[in-house]
Amino acid sequence: MYWTFTEVDYEQYLRDHEYRPGTIQAYMASVRHFRHWVEVTHGQSESTWMALTAAYLDPGAAIDGRHAFKVVRAALHHHTALAQLYGQPCPAEVPVDPISQEVDQYSEHLERVAGFSSATVTAHRRVLEQFLRTVVQPPLAPQIAWFTAKTVVTFLTTAWRHLKPGSKKRYIGVIRGYTRYLIFQGIAVDPGLLQLPLTAPVWKLDAVPRRFSAEDLECLLRAFDDTTPAGIRDYAMVLCFIDLGLRVSEVADLTLDDWDWHHGVVRIRTRKTGQERLLPVPVRLGEAVVRYLVKSRPKTGERTLFVRFAHMCGESMGPGLIRGAMCRAYARAGIAPQVTGTHILRHTKAANLYNAGADLKVIADILGHTSIDTTVIYTKVPGPALAAACGRWPTVPESTVLS
């Protein structure tokens, strides 16, 4: 008998930590699969409970293929914590996952040496981990044994075949960046990796940015329940996007100290460029933020403006939680399900400013663009809107047509 507690105890543990029902369901499924695996394959084994957990989490074994690795790892992490509460013996050290260690080191390099923003590092980390967990052949080193141009091309045409050309270009860029990192570390790599084509030509300004119509924005603003603390908070958050045109990282970084109520301005700190800018606070946004501070925000020593209400109450909300709140609002508003991000709100703000006659330099300053070339994309007009500018093709009356 490996367990000193039941699955019901584990479920209650998650509920006590205020996890959402969907998360609890996913964690329970992972733990249930883990326990079944132990009973079937190690019923008479004398292996320690912690050794079994490490074996189950071994990426090379790929035991639980039905759930994402990070979900399983998180579920068993809480399983371990509960076991310690019940006095189940656990060794002090846990075997290190070589892929996670490699991704951590590369992420540190991007942040400290390359100077990438945290959002960019996170994006590179996600792509690299997905790639390594799919193609790596243990042991991780030497890389040249499995990390070749042929490997990348095969992965691109299988696991990444569904991606659009622009996404493929970004993902291959991550792989090439990782190749340069290995060279920087003095590790021999396949020279063909740096010669990988970035797929078909992709022009930065080829597409028209998606935006919401005025009707969509009205539906979105009505999707928040102003009688609940979360509804009041999320309404203030969405106005930060709509009225100020902020990035999601900028909304997540807002603090109580950034608001100068006497002068009616707010300081925006940008992770992407490392610069700051002051923006005037619209009346609607100011009133929403004040209402959130007075009636909704829990008592906490956290200086970040938007904080959690459920799990880890009072802790700051990261970009992921903010995106999730906006995505749920899109669903309540009946907006197309393919709209899941927050950047469309920033695009909408920029397009509205341009249509109202604002100068491109002003728009660039509001959005925090370091180059006005980035702002030029908002001058593009969608195809249907061009119909009003098209004249009728001249026709010849039938009576004048020569027989």
Image (spheres, rainbow, N blue to C red):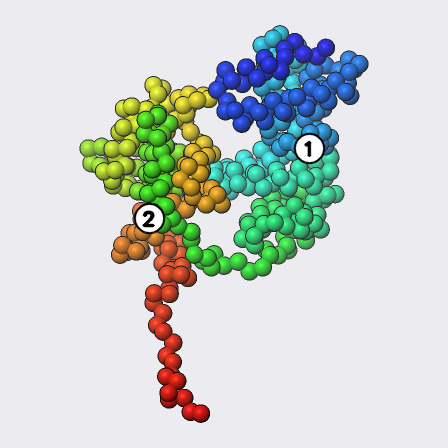
Disc 1, SS:
loop
Q: Which residue is mark 1?
A: 65
Residue positioned 27% across, 54% down in the render: 356
Q: Quadrant of the N terminus?
A: top right
Q: Is residue 55 visible?
A: yes
Residue 32 picture location, percent across and down: 66, 21
Q: Which x, y percent locates residue 301?
A: 35, 20
Residue situated in front as seen by the camera: 77 or 95: 77
Residue occupying the point 35% across, 44% down: 217
Task: Say left or right for 69 vs 232.
Answer: right
Count residues near mark 2 (Cα–Cα under 10 Å), then give few for <14, some for 14-19, many for 20+.
few
- Numbered disc 2: secondary structure: helix
* Of residues 83 and 229, the one drawn nearer to the viewer in this rendering: 229
Task: Give the amino acid type for the residue marked by disc 2 in the picture.
Answer: Ala
Q: Quadrant of residue 397?
A: bottom left
The structure residue drawn at horizontal position 58% and vertical position 47%, both measured from the top left corner, is: 171
Q: From what the image shows, is residue 249 above or below residue 2?
A: below
x, y percentage for residue 133?
66, 37
Judging by the rendered image, the residue that carries numbered circle 2 is 214
| Residue 386 in the figure: left or right of residue 194 | left
Residue placed most toward the observer, 330 or 79: 330
Determine the residue positioned at 70% across, 41% down. Answer: 135
Report the front residue among 309 and 359: 309
Q: From the viewer's perspective, is residue 375 above or below residue 285? A: below
If the image is split into quadrants, where does the C terminus sit?
bottom left
